[in-house]
Image (cartoon, rainbow, N blue to C red):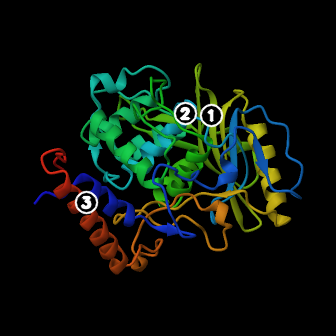
């Protein structure tokens, strides 16, 4: 006997988690990172120090260790990421590629538009030199060569988007791996902070983004190419530890930076700001360290990545209920919200089934239920 559609839908409804006696609706997701981040304006804790004047359309200041978001402006606004997207490229590919593997770029790799380190298609480069080139001098040619090493650009972009989904970076969609402007490619100040936090947990990532000066292979064996970081904060801000800048005409300047002071490591992200971004980033970091010293309450949370088994709870210890990023249905053993007991589900299904069958007998020949 086919199960009537209404009965199947009733079963699904009964299986929803219950909050305060009412079903949680899957079509009403919470704002990732906390409801206070659902704003196009500025959000900061009452009693926190006065914020500096900024020009960025969107920004976030957060604690990289705890994930606490200290203040933000339009944190989930969608903007072109420019070369800050390369942080997602690195996070996705560092665990997949052997750092000593030799890669020969293709003709298309080395002839990409925009910033290039100067790769040539007659030389084989170690993967670690390609990561250095991509993150230190924002080489678009190096980014494409890394995609070549990973099996192609399409595969790499698919994996980048899968990694963004794992991080709950739902504002991010990659179309390429180098950040050049492309229709449908976007990220947010919040997502760039999520990506940076995950990246800085990888020792190789931390080393690449903190590099000020390096050499890579040149077209001739005895003529290596000297490179220097484009991250101005790295040279000008005490305690700076990287990470990545970006710029295109459409995106304007974008930036992700981190610094350590007094036992705390903070990250600042800027979207659509002025080309001379680093004084603004420095001012926000200064504010963040003052707010941390003053024990200012966070306004949100950088959520944890999803586990391989499914959604993980996104509230940090001691987080306020409104700072829970997402509601995920899970069994009690998995640490999620409780499901209705099986006996309640069974009883409800039995009652509904009886009523449906009575109606079906009464209307035999008049009503035909659609197949599932």
Left or right of residue 308: residue 368: left
Say which quadrant the N terminus sits in. Answer: bottom left
Whole-angstrom CA distance, mark 1 to mark 3, is 59 Å
Mark 2–mark 1 CB contact (< 8 Å): yes
Q: Nearer the viewer, mark 1 or mark 3?
A: 3
* Camera-nearest residue between 178 and 314: 314
Residue 356 circle label: 3
**Residue occupying the point 61% across, 36% down:** 77
**Residue occupying the point 27% across, 39% down:** 155
* Camera-nearest residue between 62 and 24: 24
Left or right of residue 341: residue 267: right
Find residue 138 and report its horizontal and vertical position in percent. Answer: 51, 34
Residue 50 appears in the picture as rendered? yes
Find residue 107 and report its horizontal and vertical position in percent. Answer: 28, 22
Q: Closer to the N terminus: mark 2 or mark 3?
A: 2
Neighbour tally class for label 3: few under 14, some 14-19, many 20 plus, Cα within 10 Å:
some
Whole-angstrom CA distance, mark 2 to mark 1, is 6 Å
């Amino acid at each position: 006997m086919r199960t009537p559609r209404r009965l199947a839908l009733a079963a699904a409804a009964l299986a929803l988690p219950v909050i305060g006696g009412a079903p949680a609706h899957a079509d009403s997701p919470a704002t990732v990172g906390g409801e206070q981040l659902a704003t196009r304006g500025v959000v900061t804790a009452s009693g926190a120090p006065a914020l500096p004047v900024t020009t960025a359309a969107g920004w976030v200041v957060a604690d990289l260790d705890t994930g606490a978001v200290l203040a933000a402006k339009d944190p989930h606004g969608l903007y072109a990421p420019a070369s800050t997207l390369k942080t997602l490229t690195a996070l996705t590919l560092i665990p997949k590629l052997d750092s000593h593997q030799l890669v020969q770029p293709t003709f298309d790799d080395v002839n990409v538009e925009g910033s290039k380190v100067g790769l040539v298609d007659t030389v084989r480069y170690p993967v670690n030199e390609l990561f250095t080139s991509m993150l230190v001098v924002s080489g678009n040619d190096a980014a494409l060569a890394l995609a070549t090493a990973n099996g192609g650009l399409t595969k790499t972009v698919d994996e980048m988007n899968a990694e963004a989904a794992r991080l709950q970076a739902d504002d991010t969609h990659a179309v390429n791996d180098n950040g050049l402007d492309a229709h449908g490619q976007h990220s947010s100040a919040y997502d760039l902070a999520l990506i940076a936090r995950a990246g800085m947990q990888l020792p190789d990532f931390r080393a690449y983004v903190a590099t000020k000066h390096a050499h890579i292979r040149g077209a001739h064996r005895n003529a290596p190419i000297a490179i220097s970081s484009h991250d101005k904060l790295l040279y000008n801000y005490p305690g700076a530890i990287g990470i990545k800048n970006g710029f295109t005409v459409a995106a304007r300047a974008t930036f992700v930076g981190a610094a350590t002071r007094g036992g705390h490591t903070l990250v600042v992200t800027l979207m659509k700001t002025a080309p001379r971004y680093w004084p603004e980033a420095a001012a926000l970091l200064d504010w963040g360290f003052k707010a941390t010293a003053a024990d200012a309450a966070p306004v949100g949370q950088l959520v944890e990545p999803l586990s391989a088994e499914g959604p993980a709870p996104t509230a940090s210890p001691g987080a306020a209920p409104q700072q829970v990023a997402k509601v995920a249905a899970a069994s009690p053993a998995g640490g999620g919200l409780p499901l209705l007991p099986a006996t309640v589900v069974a009883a409800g299904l039995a009652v509904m089934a009886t009523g449906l069958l009575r109606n079906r007998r009464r209307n035999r020949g008049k009503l035909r239920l659609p197949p599932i």
